[in-house]
């Protein structure tokens, strides 16, 4: 479902990125394919320096369909950036990719908090965040960070995912799965 970023995926990803349903909402905008390759190389190098974590999202056949990233890593936290190509909207890839990424971040990379800044007009991403049972609207909880993100005008809502909340969610799901298995046995 996820793999490390690779220049070989750039053609497919760039074609998905430039769609008007996707492009306005991505953090790393590229005006050309060559610029996208350059940004991808920079991303790979930044990960090697520990500044971010970036993965390519794959469909069930191993085709690249988007990216998921943790930017601005400081003090065991960072900002999530995810985009998926329009042909894959509404097919469940977003939540599966986030689960796989959070597993890596929280249990392999020692990240404690993942923040999401989502534009108020990005209704699709707002709804996706609110569907996550371990995600909290943090405009009031992290008011200093919320103010910093919106210092010139109110553009973003701030969400957060804490390792403890995510871990609790995963333990509950495992318990429910175990109970269902026991009843069927």
Image (cartoon, grey):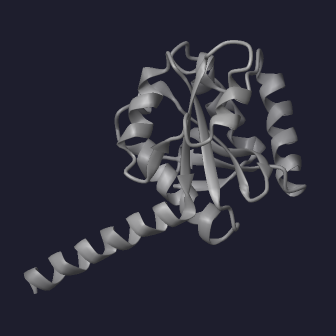
> Does residue 61 show up?
no
Image position of 5 (left or right of 166): right
Image position of 174 (left or right of 128): left
Quadrant (top left, top right, bottom left, bottom right) of the C terminus? bottom left
> Does residue 76 show up?
yes
> Which residue reaches farthest left?
184
Q: Nearer the viewer, residue 64 or 170?
A: 170
Give how far across and how far down residue 51 sits, in percent.
Answer: 84, 50
Give how far across and how far down residue 75 sits, in percent.
Answer: 79, 57
Question: At x 83% / y 23%, what residue is drawn?
Answer: 35
Question: At x 67% / y 45%, what residue is drawn?
Answer: 69
Q: Nearer the viewer, residue 64 or 160?
A: 160
Image mark count: 0
Question: At x 55% / y 21%, what residue is drawn?
Answer: 22
The answer to which image quadrant residue 14 occupies is top right
Q: Nearer the viewer, residue 34 or 55?
A: 55
Give how far across and how far down residue 62 sits, in percent.
Answer: 52, 51
The answer to which image quadrant residue 151 occupies is top right
Give how far across and how far down residue 156 sits, in percent.
Answer: 59, 24
Question: At x 43% / y 52%, what residue is drawn?
Answer: 96
Image position of 46 (left or right of 8): right
Relative height, residue 184 to residue 164 (above, below): below
């Amino acid at each position: 479902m996820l793999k490390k970023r690779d220049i070989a995926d750039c053609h497919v990803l760039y074609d998905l990125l430039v769609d008007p349903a996707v492009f306005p909402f991505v953090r790393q905008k590229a005006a050309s394919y060559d610029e996208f390759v350059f940004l991808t190389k920079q991303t790979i190098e930044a990960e090697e320096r520990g500044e971010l974590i970036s993965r390519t999202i794959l469909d069930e056949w191993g085709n690249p369909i988007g990216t998921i990233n943790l930017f601005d890593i400081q003090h065991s936290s960072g900002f999530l950036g995810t985009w998926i190509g329009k042909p894959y909207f509404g097919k469940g890839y977003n939540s599966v990719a986030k689960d796989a990424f959070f597993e890596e971040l929280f249990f392999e990379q020692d990240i404690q908090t993942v923040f999401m800044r989502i534009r108020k007009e990005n209704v699709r991403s707002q709804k996706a965040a609110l569907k996550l049972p371990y995600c909290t609207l943090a405009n009031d909880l992290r008011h200093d960070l919320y103010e910093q993100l919106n210092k010139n005008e109110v553009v973003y809502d701030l969400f957060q995912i804490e390792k403890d909340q995510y871990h609790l969610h995963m333990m509950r799901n495992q318990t429910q799965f175990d109970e269902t298995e026991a009843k069927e046995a």
